[in-house]
Image: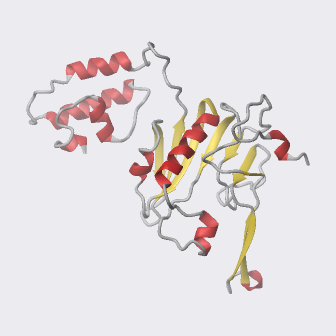
Amino acid sequence: MANENMNIIGAGQDTERPAPKKILDACCSKRAFWFDKNDNRVVYMDKRNEIITRPDISSTGGKRVLEIKPDIQADFSNLPYLSGTFCLVVFDPPHMLTLGANSYMARQYGKLSGEWRDMLRRGFSECFRVLKSDGVLIFKWNESEVSLSEVLSLTEQQPLFGHKTNTKMNTHWVCFMKQEAPVLGEESPAQNTMEGLQTATNRDRPLDGLKAENARLREALHRACDNWTYDCYAECRALNCMHVDVCEGGK
């Protein structure tokens, strides 16, 4: 089998050599949620490369084996690929703050520490950088300790939709499609519609009836805005509504 490392560039280097595959799992760990854990369309990446064992009487042989064997060993906050390389990126970063550094959970899933917000911000930025224009990012997050809304605030890209697996696990799957920053001087596709909606909103009108109007405007945004988000607070902010912090429509 060809050496995958021959198809990768060193961090910070500039080369025209492309990656041979269309999908990147930026922190694959043991590839737990993949149906095919050796899918030949995927580059499985992790900064770790190790085999971990622990006693477990419920497992064959009385021990559990965790094998983290990525195709590429690299850090998701500094991806060693050219911009616009992949069609799809999967991003499932560490999500726990309170794990012991040497606990089995920390060794399996990783652990947030230090300037973790900056690390995740760089991770989002790098994942979107290596995506092609209109490429898709699948983001997985468990909000048992850090809320999904706080983590999504670390990227300027807007999520399309998401799904919470169940109320106990608090695991969310969120789908993005990469949007390129508009060229200076160009209008975004929804700008005229957004400005019209803002003009139509009387910032000085009383709170009475505002909730209904916000709902109507949000529905219009849903139909018209390419940057649609399911976060009602952000929608009201986009409408430049002076009551955003006090009315139910803005919380």
The residue lying at 82 percent from left, 39 percent from top is 7
Q: Which is more toward the observer, 174 or 204?
A: 204
Q: How is the image coloured?
A: secondary structure
Marks counted in the figure total 0
The residue lying at 45 percent from left, 13 percent from top is 186
The residue lying at 15 percent from left, 27 percent from top is 203
Relative to 175, is 26 on the left or the right?
Answer: right
Residue 192: name its quadrant: top left
Q: Quadrant of the C terminus?
A: top left
Q: Position of residue 235 (x, y in %)?
A: 31, 34
The residue lying at 78 percent from left, 28 percent from top is 16
Q: Position of residue 167 (x, y in %)?
A: 42, 63
Q: Position of residue 14 (x, y in %)?
A: 73, 31
191 relative to 107, above or below: above
Relative to 32, is 137 on the left or the right?
Answer: left
Residue 18: name its quadrant: top right
Q: Position of residue 33 (x, y in %)?
A: 64, 57
The outermost residue toward the top is 185
The outermost residue toward the right is 1
Residue 61: name its quadrant: bottom right
